[in-house]
Image (cartoon, rainbow, N blue to C red):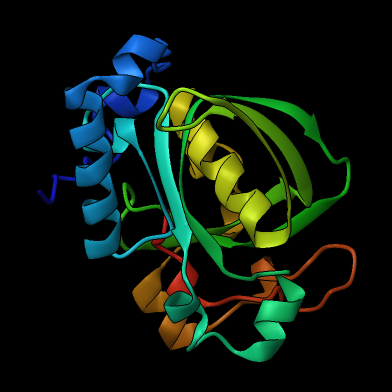
Amino acid sequence: MILKIVQVGDPVLRAAARALTRQEILSAETQQLIRDMRETMYAAPGVGLAAPQIGQSLQLAVIEDSEDNLEEVPPNDLIEKQRSPVPFHVIINPVITHLAEEKANFYEGCLSLAGFSAVVPRARSIRVEYLDERGKSRAIEASGWYARILQHEIDHLHGALYIDRMQSRTFTSLENWRQFGPGRAERDASTGQPLPADSRDAAKK
């Protein structure tokens, strides 16, 4: 079932989601929710979807950045963003145990802020401990675009949105980004060069 994705302003997006017990994870209800979230993410389309985005205040998110998503992304962007395919998986009750000090600045969007994008600084690498869809303990060490996806989805589980972290002068509608492209306000302060941008990434998470 394709679920409704709630938009910014809905209180569920600003609430800290509750953790699930292993018993809850294995329940038929949660397993069906995971299947529905996966279908909803594909339909959006997106590379991640957190439970609060479909109105459920639970610490659960689904993620997949498939090879099909990357086909139309310019090769230079794939290299710059360290972006490669990520298979489907579920993260439940995630805890960030390490964030690299080094940051990367790229355009980011959100399925719950449809039609907008902004530059968001994120750690280039991250370690996350979590439970999978069978309630088993797992850990991820991720870098590049995958690390960004994880940070974005985990933010959702704590009531945070990318607009809380964005470089506010870069905030733009996708329509205007396509028409005008990166402007002076969207240049990296350290280099003065335009930040790598891909409009396909702007409403993905």
Q: Is residue 33 above or below residue 36?
A: above
Residue 179, x across and y down, in percent: 42, 86
Q: Quadrant of residue 101?
A: top right
Question: Residue 140 versus residue 54: which sits nearer the camera?
Answer: 140
Give the residue at x 46% y 47%.
89
Question: Is residue 145 visible to us here?
Answer: yes
Question: Residue 11 versus residue 153: which sits nearer the camera?
Answer: 153
Left or right: residue 44 versus residue 71 is left
Left or right: residue 60 versus residue 35 is right
Q: Is residue 29 above or below residue 122?
A: above
Residue furthest left as drawn: 1
Question: Residue 116 versus residue 62: which sits nearer the camera?
Answer: 62
Residue 27, x across and y down, in percent: 24, 19
Q: Is residue 21 above or below residue 85?
A: above
Residue 49, x across and y down, in percent: 37, 46
Q: Quadrant of residue 84?
A: bottom right
Question: Residue 132 versus residue 41: which sits nearer the camera?
Answer: 132
Give the residue at x 43% y 83%.
178
Left or right: residue 83 versus residue 35 is right
Left or right: residue 111 versus residue 183 is left
Question: Is residue 120 visible to us here?
Answer: no
Give the residue at x 45% y 50%.
63
Give the residue at x 40% y 52%.
110
